[in-house]
Image (spheres, grey):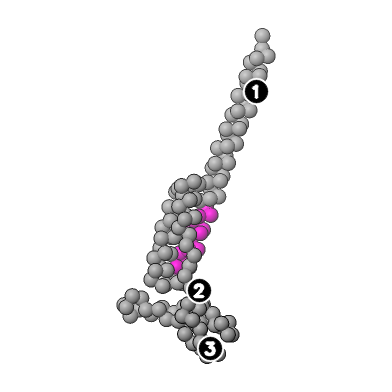
Amino acid sequence: MYCSACGAENSDNSYRCDSCGAVLVRTVDQGGSGNVHYDPEGLGPAPDRLAFSIVVTMLCCWPFGIPAIVYAAKAMSANGQRDYMQAHEMTKKASTWCWVAFCVGCAVWGSYGLFIVLMMVVGAAGAAGAAGAP
């Protein structure tokens, strides 16, 4: 692939020119369908958030973790089709839902832990009060 800014030759996997640092514009054929997508920002494939989505779903808060898994799967599919703009958009949504699930899960588990500690303190105070009564 040649840089349109300086004309230097770059490897096909480069997102920026090795010589001048300009973003390399490439076209991607969508599986021979004739649809061409441009990647002028040089985004490249989006990071995979599926593992993080599954962990927060299982350990933190599943109602908010399920949308995270769905968006992560859509991002993986868009990466497979080399539609990097959509892949990055879906990864951003998956990350948002992961953090929502994580924060809600921490709040719920923290409240539960506080409740358990409070019940232990109240129980111990009640037992101490009953032991001192005649």
Q: Quadrant of residue 36?
A: bottom left
In the image, which is nearer the foreground, mark 3 or mark 2? 3
Residue at 60 percent across and 24 percent down: it is 123
Does the magenta segment cover residue 131? no
**Residue range of the region highlighted in magenta in the rendering:** 87-100
- Residue density around tag 1, few if under 14, some if 14–19, many if 20 or more, within 10 Å: few
Residue placed under numbered mark 1 in the picture: 125
Query: Which residue is denoted by mark 3 in the rendering?
Result: 8
- Left or right: residue 100 versus residue 27 is right
Q: Is residue 95 magenta?
A: yes
Residue 104: horizontal and vertical position, in percent?
Answer: 53, 48
Is the stretch drawn in magenta largely helix, strand or loop?
Answer: helix
Give the quarter of the image for residue 35: bottom left
Relative horizontal placement of residue 97, taking residue 118 as reference (left or right): left
Q: Amino acid at mark 3?
A: Ala
Residue at the (46%, 49%) spot, across then down: 57
Residue 114 numbered tag? none
Circle 2 sits on which residue? 43
Let me know if residue 124 appears in the view. Answer: yes
Callout 1 secondary element = helix
For the residues bearing labels 2 and 1, Cβ distance under 8 angstroms: no
Mark 3, Cα crowd under 10 Å, few <14 / some 14-19 / many 20+, is: few
Residue 12: x, y in percent? 46, 80
The quadrant the C terminus occupies is top right
- Please name the amino acid that badge 1 sits on: Ala
Residue placed at 54% from the left, 80% from the top? 16
The residue positioned farthest toward the top in the image shown: 134
Q: Vertical placement of 94 versus 109: above or below?
A: below
Q: Earlier in the sequence, mark 3 or mark 1?
A: 3
> Disc 3 vs disc 1: which is toward the camera?
3
